Amino acid sequence: MNEVIDHAIRIIAIGAGATLVMDGWLMFLNRLGVPIQSFNLLGRWIGHWPGGVFCHDNIVKAAPVKGELLLGWLAHYAIGIAFVVMLVAVVGPAWLATPTPLPAIITGIVTVAAPLLVMQPAMGAGVASSKTRTPLRNCIKSIATHTVFGIGLYVAAAVVASMPEGIAG
């Protein structure tokens, strides 16, 4: 099989797997009574982009977008996959065959910049949730969640690496 296609399939599988691990963590937090955001708000934010609206005072009060929940979930997984592309671009494609935990966990922690510095401000929550009632708790939750994502990157990569060459068939 073409090495580029094989790498792409492995990257997609790792990104989806790591995002699934993160989702498991979020479900665990939710069962403990820790509030989590619905991905419909991510979909709502993205859904306003075609109209030229990239920032909101409060995304909850923004007009709903048709299909926002599905759009949010698709974006959530696409972002997870994009983070694997970033990881492989930094450490090299050899990591796909022999993954190690440190680059994965560092990547997970670094990716917390996306919600804290881009998404939350654009959705009206301020930098690092500064406009919310519980900014410190929200930041700690984001850091923990993205650390879990980093662990998921390594676990998913180890599973995918154990598969034979040419996993696409």
Image: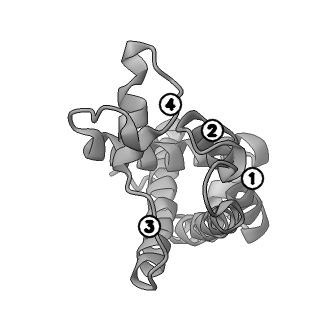
x and y percent of residue 45 in the render?
43, 34
Instruction: Please tell me how crowded label 4 is: few (under 14), some (14-19), or many (20+) other residues with Cα within 10 Å.
Output: some
Q: Residues within 10 Å of mark 3 (few under 14, many from 20)?
A: some
Outermost residue, front side: 133
User: CA–CA distance between discs 1 and 3?
Assistant: 18 Å
| Left or right of 134 on screen, residue 74 | left
The answer to whether 64 appears left or right of 11 in the picture is: left
- Judging by the rendered image, the residue that carries numbered circle 4 is 56
Q: Earlier in the sequence, mark 2 or mark 1?
A: 1
Q: For the residues marked 2 and 3, what is the alpha-carbon distance in whole angstroms?
A: 22 Å
Q: Residue at x 63, y 60 (%)?
A: 97
Query: Which amino acid lies under the numbered mark 4 shown in the image of this protein?
Result: His
Mark 2 or 1: the one toward you: 2
Question: Residue 121 shows which numbered tag?
Answer: 2
**Circle 2 crowding by C-alpha within 10 Å: few under 14, some 14–19, many from 20:** many
Provide the residue designation for mark 3. 23
Q: Quick one: SS at disc 2?
A: helix
Q: Amino acid under label 3?
A: Asp
Q: Which mark is residue 110?
A: 1
The secondary element bearing badge 1 is classed as helix
Q: Residue 13 falls in which quadrant of the image?
A: bottom left
Q: Is residue 165 visible?
A: no
